Amino acid sequence: MSEPQTRSRLIIDADSILKLPRHIKLKHDQGRGLYVILAPERVFEPDETSVEVLKLCDGERPVNTIAQILAEQYQAPADVILADIIDMLQELADKGVVKS
Amino acid sequence: MTDSATLPREDETSNSETCARAPVGLLAELTHRCPLQCPYCSNPVDLERANTELTTQEWQHVMRQAAELGILQIHLSGGEPTARKDLEDIVKTAAEVGLYTNLITAGVLLTKERLARLQELGLDHVQLSIQDVDAANADRIAAYKGGSDKKREVAKWVRELDMPLTINAPLHRQNIDNLPAIIDYSVEVGAGRLEVAHIQYYAWALKNRAALMPTREAFMKTVEIVNEAKERLKGILVFDFVVPDYYAKYPKPCMGGWGRGIMNVTPSGRVLPCHAAESLPGLEFENVRDRPLADIWLKGQAFEMFRGTEWMKEPCRSCSRKEIDFGGCRCQAYALTGDAANTDPACSLSPLHQDWAQVAKEESHKPSPEFVYRRMGKSGPAAGA
């Protein structure tokens, strides 16, 4: 095989600007009364915080700004929130749920 | 098509009580027609004929009912779903009612134009099967000349259209050594997911078990290879790895539990708790032509039969894993023990487990017999395989 490794892993930091790829669908499921993420052959059930964060991933705001918004909303320290959501978004990026 | 295309699993939805009520996914076997003849096909040995297939309107009605029932994802499968000329109409309706649409295809009948049209109509994802990366071997396994080259082209089209791609590579003794190359291939063609599913031995695969069963050593090597690649390709390729039952300690939670997360509709409209359920005696399978889908799901005799844990015998009944694996696969339990309510012999707690593991050992070490290819109305050995 010739050079199969042309793609690389997306590493999330405070400056990452993220969005959901077209084929990832975050939607509220009326019947079940919860949010679901529809992905290729997968259904994820995000927790409340993940839903908040994903809604803010609009392809314009950097992760840092998202952390500030949530810090104000929940009156929590922005640096703690930033560290938490970087971990969360890294996990989601590895599952293909967010992209840059 | 493999079991691994089903939901739910691990960290995903399924646990809440609500999901016990509504299925997450529906496997729509649009047709049993297929140009390929893979000897491990998951379709039943008695294939349904074209003239019994649901009409376009009937499938569209199934899609609408599925959405109302709370189903989230539709897996359009077969046979080969693109053999239906009205696939576009079915995809269009499914997308319109908000279902996540997944095309499970062998690819060989597709054109780029058709794929683009399906995308335009709302197709969300393509799962493309490959038989091997060695073209000659792949074409021999599928009994379809030129299939391998065509598939590579289809993978390219999917990515050119910026659609997400899963490569599905069923693994067995006749391609198992090429696993590293299969992983490279998936990265190279731009897949985001790779399903490497060891063959599950029902229907056609059970007929061909001796020709497909890898040795335990070969299987263990695949575990190492996949674990290494998972780490190396984190964020590039998501792995979905299905191990062979015969070498497992505990059984798979088949279908995520009977009548729990998935339903299957056959080409003629029969609604099944799993695609192999017709092999079980004493079950009544209802048809979407006769009864609403929700009624069949909630009250159908076949769904009620093994739903939950009440039907279980020992050792399942008192087992701490009964809500984890649901006693494994009913069809395998029946095929190998004569009683579908017995523990799946894949479980090390089954009294038959040792004998069963011995069968795998013996068959995998003998020279492989010839394939019995999947064919309509023929099940004799293939000539010149």
Image (cartoon, coloured by chain):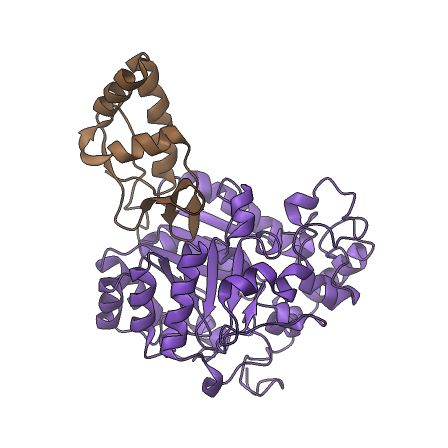
Report the side of B215 relative to A81 (left or right).
Answer: right
Q: Relative to the observer, which residue lies in front, B254 or B230?
A: B254
Q: Specify whether residue B4 is in view.
A: yes
Q: Residue at x 49, y 84 (%)?
A: B52
Q: Colour of chain A?
A: brown
Q: Residue at x 52, y 57 (%)?
A: B262
Q: Residue at x 58, y 72 (%)?
A: B286
Q: Quadrant of the C terminus of chain B?
A: bottom right
Q: Is residue B299 above or below residue A58?
A: below
Q: Is residue A23 above or below residue B213?
A: above
Residue B230 x/y as whole percent: 45, 42
Q: Colour of chain B?
A: purple
Q: Residue at x 46, y 72 (%)?
A: B78
Q: Is residue A5 above or below residue B304?
A: above
Q: Relative to the observer, which residue lies in front, A26 or B243?
A: A26
Q: Relative to the observer, which residue lies in front, A97 or B379?
A: A97
